Image: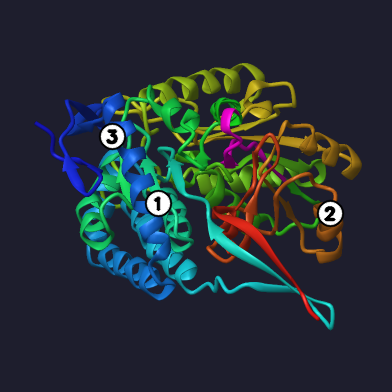
């Protein structure tokens, strides 16, 4: 028996098997969901292909109205979705409510966008326009750190453009996606939206199948490479939002208390399991001790526990594999630096790691050079601006970065030299539906959010008319 069925071709499908979903705060299953077979995946692709042309022919205002109906449903069911999100993902309830609240905001933003043709040339000789058409069937493959929001912000622009959509959530966090299945089935025509659940063994069907026109993937860089390789067989369109090892550079004139508060808010949000979280902090040696002390004071206030317990600021790691990785980074912290806060696994059930600060550590440590995706922050001293920019840019990743300074001109000058898709000044991790989001280097391909991100779900088509 399953508590949550999949959605395939307008039917709620129990599947042939059930998949346990673990509450990371307890390490025990709290529900079961339907698990797809290979035939279910093939059925979802066929259903989406059948439904797509009719959906694309649906007037844009009707497509908008249905998306807004979905946004209203999420608003009306936000409490249930958020509490379920805590149980499957582990994050504190306040953070879960924030994630769920962002989802309808993204839907409404995309629903307001115009798809009118854009005039490229209009003179006595030619009228040339850029038109935006649907691609066909789009697959959204989503991760476990923001399982609800990421799926919704892929689904909304894809559907607005007239594509059909297949959503494959991460197997450890499928429940909040499946909560939407019944509403999606009522709002959209059969086959326009499908949700399939596997145990990470069937994603290749989506990335290889010639009837899938685009894959929008968020996850690790290693998996992103596999997606890209598979997609090459049919030259699928791709959006890949991949890993990050975001560096923050704290200049000598930074406001120490304000910086410590904001760095803590970024580095330890969602237990550090955020692709654009601040993951390594470079601090000028002249204020290094003061900044370490200020950070220690802030991080020491972070209460760890079950996300449904009042006062919890940091929940568990989401799954056993990530927990084991985090413990290896704790070993690196102890071996390569000096731990000033935390440094231990939390005793008892669940995948808990204490919020941890490590000072007197250097580049070359795995904790500095790799994406730890855990509530562990290395603080590294630097002396010269040119040196620290080179160190910050030395990573294969380039998702985000930040500069911290009261001198706006100095901060701007450093930001201009950082190799990242986004550079924040005196904050880190801020995003929104209207702000284009793209990675540099091995952090991804393509753009999400903003009009630029929306149009990644379209086929650009130029219509050129000769006059006279």
Residue at x 66%, y 43% (from the top left corner): 399
**Could you say which is closer to the camera, residue 422 or residue 301?**
422
**Could you say which is closer to the camera, residue 283 or residue 439?**
439
Quadrant housing the N terminus: top left
Instruction: Inspect the magenta stretch and tell me whether residue 247 lies in it.
Output: yes
Gap in angstroms between the C-alphas marked 1 and 3:
36 Å
> Which numbered mark, 1 or 2, is in the foreground of this view?
1
Q: Tell me the magenta residue range.
A: 233-248
Gap in angstroms between the C-alphas marked 1 and 2:
39 Å
Instruction: Inspect the magenta stretch and tell me whether residue 272 lies in it.
Output: no
SS at badge 2: loop
> Which numbered mark, 3 or 2, is in the foreground of this view?
2
Residue at x 40%, y 38% (from the top left corner): 144
Instruction: Please give left or right for residue 248 compared with residue 316 in the image.
Output: right
In the image, residue 456 above or below residue 87: below
Packing grade of label 2 (10 A; few <14, some 14-19, many >=20) is few
Quadrant housing the C terminus: bottom right
In the picture of the structure, the residue carrying the numbered disc 3 is 25
**Dot placed on the residue nearer the N-terminal end, 1 or 2:** 1
**Dot placed on the residue nearer the N-terminal end, 3 or 2:** 3
**Could you say which is closer to the camera, residue 97 or residue 350?**
97
Gap in angstroms between the C-alphas marked 3 and 2:
42 Å
**Dot placed on the residue nearer the N-terminal end, 1 or 3:** 3
Residue 384 image point, x, y percent: 89, 41
Residue 316 image point, x, y percent: 36, 35
Residue 24 appears anywhere in the view: no
In the picture of the structure, the residue carrying the numbered disc 2 is 416
């Amino acid at each position: 028996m399953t508590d949550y069925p999949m959605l395939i071709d307008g039917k709620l499908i129990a599947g042939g098997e059930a998949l346990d979903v673990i509450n990371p705060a307890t390490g025990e299953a709290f529900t079961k969901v339907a698990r797809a077979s290979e035939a279910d995946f093939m059925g979802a692709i066929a259903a989406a292909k059948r439904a797509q042309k009719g959906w694309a022919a649906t007037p844009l205002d009707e497509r908008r109205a249905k998306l807004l109906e979905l946004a209203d449903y999420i608003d009306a069911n936000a409490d249930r979705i958020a509490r379920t999100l805590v149980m499957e993902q582990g994050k504190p309830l306040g953070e879960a409510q924030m994630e769920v609240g962002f989802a309808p905001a993204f839907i409404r933003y995309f629903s307001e966008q115009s798809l009118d043709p854009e005039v490229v040339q209009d003179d006595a000789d030619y009228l040339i326009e850029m038109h935006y058409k649907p691609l066909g069937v789009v697959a959204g493959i989503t991760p476990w750190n923001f399982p609800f929001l990421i799926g919704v912000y892929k689904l909304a622009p894809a559907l607005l453009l007239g594509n059909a959509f297949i959503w494959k959530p991460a197997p450890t966090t499928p429940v909040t996606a499946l909560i939407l299945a019944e509403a999606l089935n009522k709002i959209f025509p059969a086959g326009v939206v499908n949700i399939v659940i596997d145990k990470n063994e069937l994603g290749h069907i989506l990335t290889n199948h010639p009837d899938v026109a685009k894959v929008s993937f968020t996850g690790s860089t290693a998996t992103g490479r596999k997606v890209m390789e598979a997609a090459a067989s049919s030259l699928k369109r791709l959006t890949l939002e991949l890993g990050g090892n975001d560096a923050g550079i704290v200049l000598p004139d930074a406001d120490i208390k304000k910086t410590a508060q904001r760095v803590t808010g970024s580095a330890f949000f969602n237990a550090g399991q955020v692709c654009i979280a601040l993951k390594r902090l470079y601090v000028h040696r002249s204020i290094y001790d003061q900044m370490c002390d200020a950070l220690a004071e802030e991080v020491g206030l972070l209460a760890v526990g079950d996300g449904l317990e009042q006062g919890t600021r940091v929940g568990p790691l989401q799954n056993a594999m990530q927990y084991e990785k985090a413990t290896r980074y704790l070993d690196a912290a102890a071996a390569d630096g000096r731990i000033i806060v935390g440094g231990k696994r939390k005793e008892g059930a669940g995948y808990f790691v204490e919020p941890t600060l490590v000072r007197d550590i250097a580049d070359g440590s795995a904790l500095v050079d790799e994406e730890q995706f855990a509530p562990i922050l290395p603080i590294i001293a630097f002396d010269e601006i040119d040196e620290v920019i080179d160190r910050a840019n030395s990573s294969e990743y380039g998702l985000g970065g930040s500069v911290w300074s009261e001198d706006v001109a100095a901060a701007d000058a450093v930001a201009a030299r950082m190799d990242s898709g986004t550079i924040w000044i005196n904050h880190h991790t801020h995003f929104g539906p209207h702000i284009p989001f793209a990675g540099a280097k091995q952090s991804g391909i393509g753009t999400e959010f903003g009009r630029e991100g929306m149009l990644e779900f379209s086929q650009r088509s130029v219509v050129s008319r000769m006059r006279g």
